[in-house]
Image (tube, coloured by chain):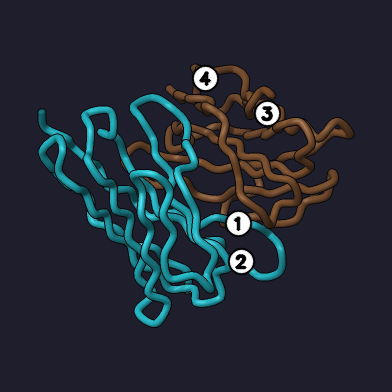
Amino acid sequence: GEDVEQSLFLSVREGDSSVINCTYTDSSSTYLYWYKQEPGAGLQLLTYIFSNMDMKQDQRLTVLLNKKDKHLSLRIADTQTGDSAIYFCAESGGSGNTGKLIFGQGTTLQVKP
Amino acid sequence: DAGVTQSPTHLIKTRGQHVTLRCSPISGHKSVSWYQQVLGQGPQFIFQYYEKEERGRGNFPDRFSARQFPNYSSELNVNALLLGDSALYLCASSRTGAETQYFGPGTRLLVL
């Protein structure tokens, strides 16, 4: 089956690192994504990783992929109050080239000043 | 370039009515996908269209339908609205459908 699981809530202090974790079930996923959603807004693409990669770094963001354990994580360095939002992990599920994204339920990141 | 645009931004309907939501993809993108996001949950896939053909459909009733026009814009139609259809409806565009999807701001639908 297709399922993506995330922890629901994470609270950190400004300046600390945040690590948001995700597990998925579809081993055939080609890409795995992280999206950010601020209150009342749509989804903003943060970063993505191809399934044959272990790590991807993009400025303050580091994505780690453990394909054996089907575990994906997003590390945000030097977390700022503006990083407070809901973060969604998504896998590209579905057969063929449907491009269907399967999302987790989202992790709410609270950054305390 | 403009991002994905959706209209209207907000909509209030009553049970039994129908609604049409609209989406314009990023210039050069030929695929549009629709997602429903109920409050407190992640988005759920409804449809994907590529080159005006339906490429994928999620687990939604036949009350939900969509189409894509020659200019690659898309409409999502929902008939016989139920209270449970209240949600944020998100449109995403991509070049071919199998690549990275970029989301619009969504249409917030409230069914009373």
Residue beneath disc 3? B23
Q: Identify the residue shown where x is 62% and y is 19%.
A: B7
Query: Furthest residue to the right?
Result: B70
Residue type, numbered disc 2: Gly
Callout 3: SS? strand
Element assignment for label 1? strand
Identified by mark 4, the residue type is Lys
Q: Furthest-bottom residue in view?
A: A68
Asked if labels 4 and 3 share a chain, the reply is yes
Marks 1/2 same chain: yes
Q: Name which residue type carries label 3.
A: Cys
Q: CA distance from mark 4 to mark 3?
A: 19 Å
Name the chain letter of the residue that bears numbered label 3: B
Q: Residue at x 55, y 62 (%)?
A: A31
- Mark 1–mark 2 contact, CB under 8 Å? yes
Query: Does residue A38 sit above or below A11 in this rendering?
Result: above
- Note whether A107 is above or below A41 in the view shown: below
Pointer 1 chain? A
Mark linked to residue B13: 4
Disc 2 marks which residue?
A94
The letter of the brown chain is B
Q: Are marks 1 and 4 in contact (CB under 8 Å)?
A: no
Q: Amino acid at mark 1?
A: Lys
Mark closer to the chain start, 1 or 2: 2
Q: Secondary structure at mark 2?
A: loop
